[in-house]
Image (spheres, helix red, strand yellow):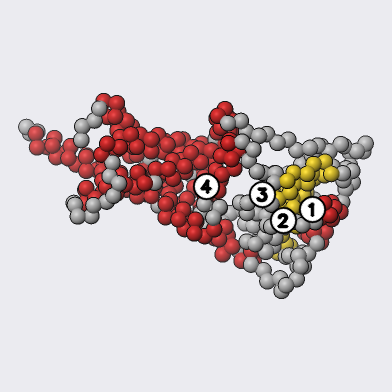
Amino acid sequence: MKFHPFRKALFQIHLWIGIAAALYVVLVGFTGAALVFRPEFQALSFPEFFSIDKGGQADAPVAGIIEKLQQRYPGYELAGIDYPTRRRASYLSYLTKGPELVAAFSNPVSAAVIGELPKSSWITKLQDLHFDLLGGSTGRMANGIGALSLMAMFLTGLVVWWPAMSVKVNFRTGWKRMNWDLHSATGFWLFGFLLLWAVTGVEFSFPARFRQVVNAISPLTVFRAPESAPAADGTAAVDIPELVAKARLLVPDAKPGRIVWPSSKRAAVLILMARVDHGDFDTSDEVELYFDQYSGNLLLRREGATEAASGGDLFMKWIGPLHVGSFGGSGVKVLWVILALSFPVLAVTGALMWWNRVRRFSMGVRKNSKF
């Protein structure tokens, strides 16, 4: 195959990025495919937290949850409580003590604390491998660079292979031609998905810079939560269960989904109400209520608070769900797993193509050698 000098340069870029990133591509492909079912793996690994038979009884009042948590974790501060969801039957609470963060689960009927989410498990190791390459912040930066490299490889691949693009695999030819067809057809048909995962991978690694770029193209909506007016003595006097009761009256057709304690002396208490269910991708049924942490007065009510207001908002809203396939049920997740395996397919077929080129070159040198 003869290339125009420009396309020849792009071919070399595509080739060497592919060689350098082959193992990385295989790694992110397999780990990404596994993490599509991370919630299901969590439920299977910790059934005592996720699968609880309530015997038809109503959820315990949040006052009991708070009381039991305070007894179990003296000296800790509550940061938030998530109510039971369709996927998780227990209450999930976050408590802090200095830099320490505890994720505690409470029985939805008795309010008793039933355990903590382990800080290290095979699921967290898998997450660290996929997002941070087991290297912390340095690994996440390297992952971002890897995602940028994938973007370059996919874009150059589209240009390089377009004139001779194979859109199907001919299984009646030799294995080298089949390998070529498989590499080419996979890249062609799944180009949009592959580029999507690379772009979203960049966002996860460099979120601030990514938002700046998106904002320059389509301005993002910046929401500033209302602030509380500090009391004279600086002591918050509101009662959280009373605020929950007030929230129920304000949104009678919804149920509490989340409570977020104020993170500073001027922050507000946030109570999220959901008309259908919280903790899923659809947030159009949610209402955010912000209360003054000193007076208990309602500061702001946001209906469908996370709905996109601009093209940039819509793009940012979909990045997470599109990356992990969390927007359409089990069918979409199975499809996402299958599509994610295209990464190792491209890596292996590309490596075989490169090795064939190396062998042909080596054999040609030996054949023409005078020694």
Q: What amino acid is at disc 2?
A: Arg
Q: How crowded is mark 3: few (under 14 residues within 10 Å), some or many (20 or more)?
A: some
Foreground residue, 343 or 356? Answer: 343
Quarter holding the N terminus?
A: top left
Residue indicated by mark 2: 275
Q: x, y (%) of residue 10?
A: 32, 30
Q: Residue 325: horizontal and vertical position, in percent? A: 52, 52
* Three-letter amino acid code at the position of disc 1: Val
Q: Are marks 4 and 1 in contact (CB under 8 Å)?
A: no
Q: How far apart are marks 1 and 3 (CA)?
A: 14 Å
Disc on res. 251: 1
Mark 4 nearby-residue class (10 Å; few <14, some 14–19, many ≥20): some
Q: In the image, 197: left or right of 224?
A: left
For label 3, the residue is 284
User: Is label 3 in a helix, a strand or a loop?
Assistant: loop
Element under disc 4: helix
Q: Which residue is drawn at 45% across and 55% down?
A: 335
- Residue 221 is situated, as x and y percent measured from the top left of the image, at 66, 34
Q: Position of residue 310 (x, y in %)?
A: 61, 36
Q: Name the residue under label 4.
A: 322
In three-dimensional space, the C-alpha distance between marks 4 and 1, rounded to whole angstroms, equals 31 Å
Rounded to the nearest angstrom, the CA distance separating label 4 from label 3 is: 18 Å
Q: Where does the C terminus fall, quadrant-wise?
A: top left
Which mark's residue is nearer the viewer, 4 or 2? 2
Mark toward the start of the polypeptide (2 vs 3): 2
Question: Looking at the picture, which amino acid does disc 4 mark?
Answer: Leu
- For marks 1 and 2, the one nearer the N-term is 1
Q: On screen, 65 above or below 138?
A: below
Residue 16 shows in the view = no
Q: Which of marks 4 and 1 is nearer the N terminus?
A: 1
Marks 1 and 2 close (CB-CB < 8 Å)? yes
Q: Are marks 4 and 2 in contact (CB under 8 Å)?
A: no
